[in-house]
Amino acid sequence: MTLDNLFHDLESQLERELDAELLNRLEDEERERRSKLTLRDRLIAIQEDQDTHLVSFNLTDEREITGTIKNIGKDWVAIEVDTPQELYGALIVSLLAIRSLCIPIECERLSLGNQVGEVTDSALEALSSRPRLAQKVNLAFVLRDIGRRRKTVTIATQKQNVRGTIDHVGQDHLDLRTSYGMLICTLREVLYVRIE
């Protein structure tokens, strides 16, 4: 064996070991990145895709709602409901009310975001643009705006659906004026709000 062959073999072996080490490190970083993903992060990734995707939401009251994600806030998601027919239209769902999701196959990879070391056109656009204002807004803020506009709503909780107008939204509750009087409801009990 010549010295040239020896050093060439050593270089090849070293390159393979460095490549394997780099791949292991990238895989570890990717596992760590995925462990920090929230449901909200995954919904944002689906919503930011250019294609429209129907997503099925299974709520804590056992109701299943299928629709298109229109917007996402701090603790809520706005859905254009496709089914069930009685909820057709705009719905604001508390993230705490979502028990599970069923997403189309083409959204599985998309919902996980960009892998470590991967740069896509949408990732570059996200870096260059400001986050949407809605993503910073909580459910109470949205409900205050609906109340200010005096829109009739149906508020669903685990126990009941109540129709009325929102008079006041505090830090942790809302006042709903109904035909029977005033209902004070804690925000953590709100599953979704349907704007009529």
Image: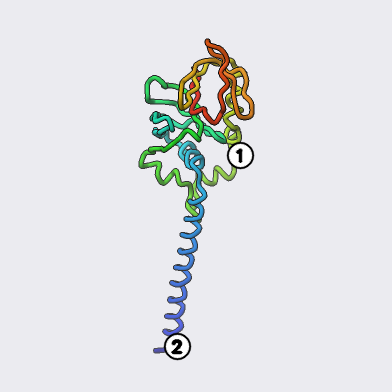
The foreground one among 190 and 25 is 190
In the image, residue 10 sits, relative to residue 91, either above or below, namely: below
Identity of the residue drawn at 47% across and 33% down: 97
Identity of the residue drawn at 55% across and 34% down: 73
The foreground one among 79 and 166 is 166
Pointer 1 or 2: first along the chain? 2
The foreground one among 49 and 162 is 162
Provide residue 59's location: percent of width, then percent of height. 43, 32
**Residue carrying label 2:** 3
**Residue carrying label 1:** 130
Q: Tell me if residue 66 can be seen.
A: no
Kind of residue at badge 1? Arg
Query: Could you tell me which secondary element the residue under label 2 belongs to?
Result: helix
Number of callouts in the render?
A: 2
Which label sits on residue 99?
A: none
Q: Residue furthest left?
A: 105
Residue 60, by quadrant, is top left
Q: Tell me if residue 166 can be seen.
A: yes
Indicate left or right for 148 with 71 as reference. Answer: right
Indicate left or right for 182 with 49 as reference. Answer: right
From the image, which quarter does the N terminus lie in? bottom left
Query: Could you tell me which secondary element the residue under label 1 belongs to?
Result: loop
Identity of the residue drawn at 48% across and 24% down: 156
Provide residue 41's location: percent of width, then percent of height. 51, 42
Provide residue 122's location: percent of width, then percent of height. 50, 43
Provide residue 21's location: percent of width, then percent of height. 47, 68
Crowding around mark 1 (Cα neighbors within 10 Å: few <14, some 14 to 19, many 20+) is few
Kind of residue at badge 2? Leu
In the image, residue 75 sits, relative to residue 150, either above or below, namely: below
